[in-house]
Amino acid sequence: MSAITKGFFDRLVGDATLVALLGTYKSAPSIFTKRPLPPGFDIEAHGPYVLTTGEAVQDPGPADVKNSKGREIVRDILCFSKLSDSATVVEEVAEQVRFLFQRQVFSITGFSIIVAEVSGPIEADEDDALGRVVSVRLVLKES
């Protein structure tokens, strides 16, 4: 897992409010960092869940200048709940994810966060799940 992915994962799994809103899989909160989801995972039994898999956009960014290295990233965090759930379930998860990243500084090994902005949640329903997407934009300076 990259340092950036680990920073996102640790921020998500470390929040008791978010963890209380999620299901569990193998005794851990249903927070995943890669696709496909693990064998045996079922949204009916283990949802709601959160998935963050990598950057949607990655550019040098405004912190990448002559005397320092930096990058600007946008990472989507997908939130899902069962189709039979009220939309309120997935919306609460997505709003908590938004709260965790909007204008918040958190730890990413090897980087300092200069800007943290969030857009969404945006509806992203799938055939088998209610979904919302929260997009996190970070401007990072390499340490």
Image (spheres, rainbow, N blue to C red):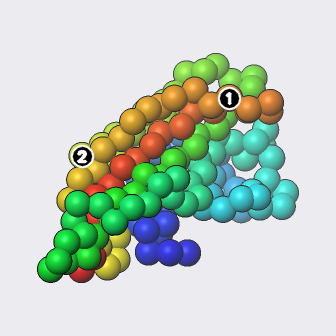
Kind of residue at badge 1? Asp
Which residue does the numbered mark 2 point to in the structure image?
A: 103
Q: What element carries label 1?
A: loop
**Relative to 27, is 109 above or below?**
below
Residue 133 at x, y = what percent?
54, 37
Quote the CA–CA distance across marks 2 and 1. 27 Å
Seen in the image, is 100 located left or right of residue 82?
left
Q: Residue 125 carries which label?
A: 1
Residue displayed at 75% across by 23% down: 84
Kind of residue at badge 2? Arg
Seen in the image, is 57 located left or right of residue 51?
left
Q: What element carries label 2?
A: loop
The one of 115 and 9 positioned closer to us in this rendering: 115
Residue displayed at 58% across by 40% down: 79
| First of labels 2, 1 by sequence position | 2
Q: From the image, which quarter does the C terminus lie in?
A: bottom left
Q: Is residue 112 visible?
A: no
